[in-house]
Image: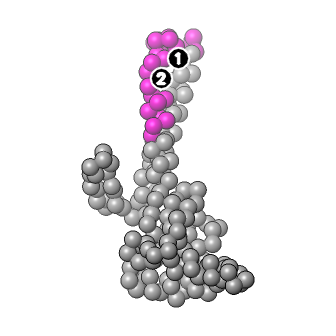
Amino acid sequence: MDFVGSFGNDDTITIKATYEDWIVIADDLKTGARILEEGIDRAEREIADPDVQGVGTVEANAPFVKAIRETIAKRLARAEAIYDMTTTRCLDCGVDTEISGYVNRVPADKAWIDGYICGPCGDTFDGANDDGDDPWDALDAYLPARIAEVDNADPTAAEFRRWFKRQDGEERTSGQVDSE
């Protein structure tokens, strides 16, 4: 995994990684937190068991157990926050809306990602809807040409669409008409 990080002026760090690497980071955080949680569960059982010698009392260990449980909760929250992604990309064609398609772009979100629908994709959908046509059919007919245009200008758009399709599964996105 190759990462590039930069510190912001607002106590944040921006980490650039591939989409797949980003999800691996979240999964690793969650796995580590689960292992830590299993360990503290086992320790609590041993502390509460009067037959186990040398582990101290429940009262004596309570501050340590509480601190470890708080650490687990923080790690799990961080891992979940990684899944709550924000992107400037169009969730249909994959264009970076800060570079192209900014005019008329609209916010679009799924349960786990906030992004945009670029102006051209949104206009196609809305235009078909206004004309009484099926907007999904219109978008599906429009996307292959739009995707070719986007990929010609930005090869990373295809990577985003492939990743998004794997994460989103059944959502209607350009990944359904993408031949890759």
Circles 1 and 2, Cβ within 8 Å, touching? The answer is yes
| Mark 2 secondary-structure assignment | helix
Closer-to-camera residue (60/43): 60
Closer-to-camera residue (35/116): 116
Residue 65: mark: 2
Q: Residue flagged by tag 1: what amino acid is it?
A: Ile
Residue 26 in percent (x, y) is at 46, 51
Residue drawn at x 50%, y 53% as measured from the top left: 84
Specify whether residue 12 is in view: yes
Residue drawn at x 52%, y 13% as measured from the top left: 58
Residue 49 in percent (x, y) is at 58, 15
The magenta region covers 49-75
Is 68 contained in the magenta span?
A: yes
Residue 113 in percent (x, y) is at 52, 59
Front tag of 1 and 2: 2
- Which quarter of the figure is the N terminus placed in? bottom left
- Answer above or below: position of 47 versus 36: above
Residue 23 in percent (x, y) is at 46, 57
Closer-to-camera residue (171/60): 171
| Mark 1 secondary-structure assignment | helix
Does residue 160 appear to the left or right of 15 in the view shown?
right
Taking the view exactly as shown, the residue that stands out farthest to the right is 132
Does residue 15 appear to the left or right of 138 in the view shown?
left
Q: Which residue is mark 1?
A: 47
Q: Residue flagged by tag 2: what amino acid is it?
A: Val
Residue drawn at x 45%, y 40% as measured from the top left: 75
